[in-house]
Image (spheres, rainbow, N blue to C red):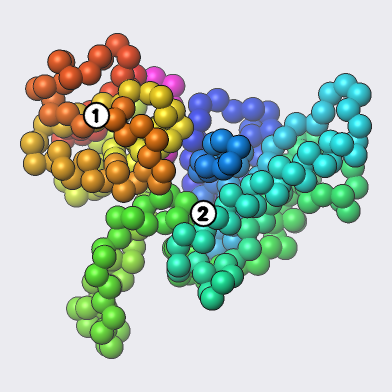
Amino acid sequence: MLDIVFGSAGQSPAETSLREVLSSANLDGTLYFAYPLFDSADGQVSADALLITREHGLVLFDLTPHPRGDQESDAWIEELLDRQDEIFRNISSKLFDNKNLVKRRDLVLEPQIVTYFAEDPEISEDDIIFATPETLVQLIGSFPSLLEEHERALNATIQRVTTIKPNNKRLNVDKEDSLGAVLKKIEAGVANLDSWQKKSAIAYPEGPQRIRGLAGSGKTIVLALKAAYLHARHPDWNIAVTYYSRSLQQQFKDLVRRLCTKPRKMSLIGVRFIFFIAGAVDQNQAFILEWRVRMTLSH
């Protein structure tokens, strides 16, 4: 089953076409739109879409539309190649941060960069790697697969939760059926969000979003990741994280700080006990993230 996560509101025709083609391709993995965000020398950028499957590895999509007017074909292809190169540099830099994806000085996987067109652009396949609705599935099928441990590490890196993994590793586990082996397997999975957590933390709906879950289902992690993601996408926003239990304050602050890969203006993320929220933040100008027994997000 293909999980689809929307990192921004709204869908362009190319995004809709890509979603429809991949949804009908019987893939198992996750398709992200407008996620993750990358920090480059030229500012903040993101791939238009990103696909992770064990069968076909990591694929990033550029959805640059076909030019209008009299733009020269050669100049346009050069722009597409520059865009693909930029995406490759940014994702490679991000992957190198996770040592589980690096062997010696090389990545254990090769990111595949594809420019996708909803209609045939009438250009040569020798000029650039691109796909249309008719050729996309065949092209993806030619990409190499991932090992299970590399897929897990890749998901953790893309979801930005590698920083919440346990610091102490269990290096002395010898028996596969021992309690230590069981705990080691559980700890390895801590750095991956499940399907609902991914959509809750990254999804970018228009209007209020309500997420409910039982104790221990990950609401606190999801809320902290949501605050970090919103801060990355909108560094000038005032974001208020509110809660009802005083003991959560330091945990929220630590999680948000660790999940913000490159904090810009952390002072704009206010972690506040709910009874002090009125005097601490302008509710008319703040994006409020509220934690209860259920989690409610409202704008």
Q: Amino acid at mark 1?
A: Gly
Residue 190: where, in percent of width, then height? 31, 59
Q: Residue at x 63, y 52 (%)?
A: 89
Task: Please say whether residue 116 is one of the residues in the magenta stretch.
Answer: no
Distance Cα–Cα, label 1 vs label 2 = 27 Å
**Residue sitting nearer the eye, 80 or 58:** 80
**Residue sitting nearer the eye, 257 or 5:** 257
Q: Amino acid at mark 2?
A: Lys
Residue reaching furthest to the top: 284
Task: Please say whether residue 203 is one of the residues in the magenta stretch.
Answer: yes
Say if 123 sits above or below 157 in the image: above
Q: Which residue is label 1 attached to?
A: 270
Q: In the figure, is residue 119 to the left or right of 97?
A: right
Q: Which residues are magenta?
A: 202-207
Residue reaching furthest to the bottom: 174
Q: Residue at x 49, y 63 (%)?
A: 151
Residue 284: where, in percent of width, then height? 29, 11
Q: In the figure, is residue 236 to the left or right of 34?
A: left
Q: Which residue is label 2 attached to?
A: 94
Q: Residue at x 87, y 50 (%)?
A: 127
**Residue sitting nearer the eye, 14 or 271:** 271
